[in-house]
Amino acid sequence: MKMLEMKDIILFHKKLIEKTGGSDGIRDYSLIDSALNRAFASFDGKDLYESIEEKISVIATSMVKNHGFIDGNKRIGIAVMLLLLQLNEIVVQYIQTELIELGLNIASGNYSEQDVTEWIEEHKENKA
């Protein structure tokens, strides 16, 4: 799986805040690091999250819920999800309101990582 590094996420957040508004800054580096690495957790030698889609879902959900940044945690979580999907050549189709709804549902606790994985699967571009 192609992945982003912490420095990439921090720069991406800064650019996102510059473009969309809000407060730039990091609340807790370890929460961002945890969100990025949680997808690669294993138990007894087996990955807890096997597919790339599951790993990306876990990262997005953790980015939103961990509140590693002062502001824009929903935005960066969804933006990182989209970037990781693109980096890993997974094409999804959506409209902007669907992304907003996804971020709000993750933040409110209405969507689990499994729900986000299902969202990705439902929005994948059909390859004929």
Image (spheres, rainbow, N blue to C red):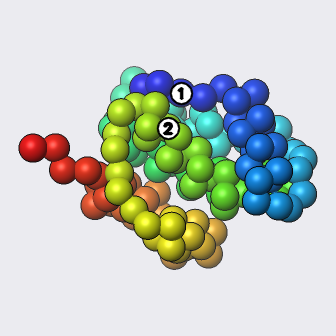
The tag on residue 3 is: 1
Q: Residue 52 placed where, x, y %?
A: 37, 37
Q: Which residue is mark 2?
A: 84
Q: Quadrant of residue 95?
A: bottom left
Question: Do the residues bearing badges 1 and 2 touch, measured as CB atoms within 8 Å?
Answer: yes
Q: Residues within 10 Å of mark 1 (few under 14, many from 20)?
A: few
31 sits left or right of 60 in the view: right
Q: Is residue 23 left or right of residue 91?
A: right
Is residue 5 something that shows in the picture?
yes
> Where 99 falls versus 36 (above or below)?
below
Residue 1 position, x and y percent, is 42, 26
Residue at 57 percent of width and 39 percent of height: 38
Q: In the image shown, does 76 or 113 lie closer to the viewer?
A: 76
Q: Amino acid at mark 2?
A: Leu
Q: Residue at x 74, y 49 (%)?
A: 16
Q: Please, which residue is most extreme toward the front here?
A: 19
Q: Is residue 59 visible?
A: no
Residue drawn at x 88%, y 50% is: 24
**Percent x, y for residue 84?**
49, 38
Residue 110: x percent and y percent? 51, 75
Farthest residue toward the left?
Answer: 128
Name above or below for residue 8 compared with residue 13: above
Q: Is residue 42 above or below residue 71?
A: above
First in sequence, mark 1 or 2: give its number: 1
Amino acid under disc 1: Met
Identify the secondary structure beneath mark 2. Answer: helix
Query: In the structure shown, which secondary structural element does the residue marked by tag 1 occupy?
Result: loop
Image quarter (top left, top right, bottom left or bottom right) of the C terminus: top left
Residue 103: numbered disc = none
Question: Position of 122 compared to 98: left or right?
Answer: left
Residues at marks 1 and 2, CA–CA distance in whole angstroms? 7 Å
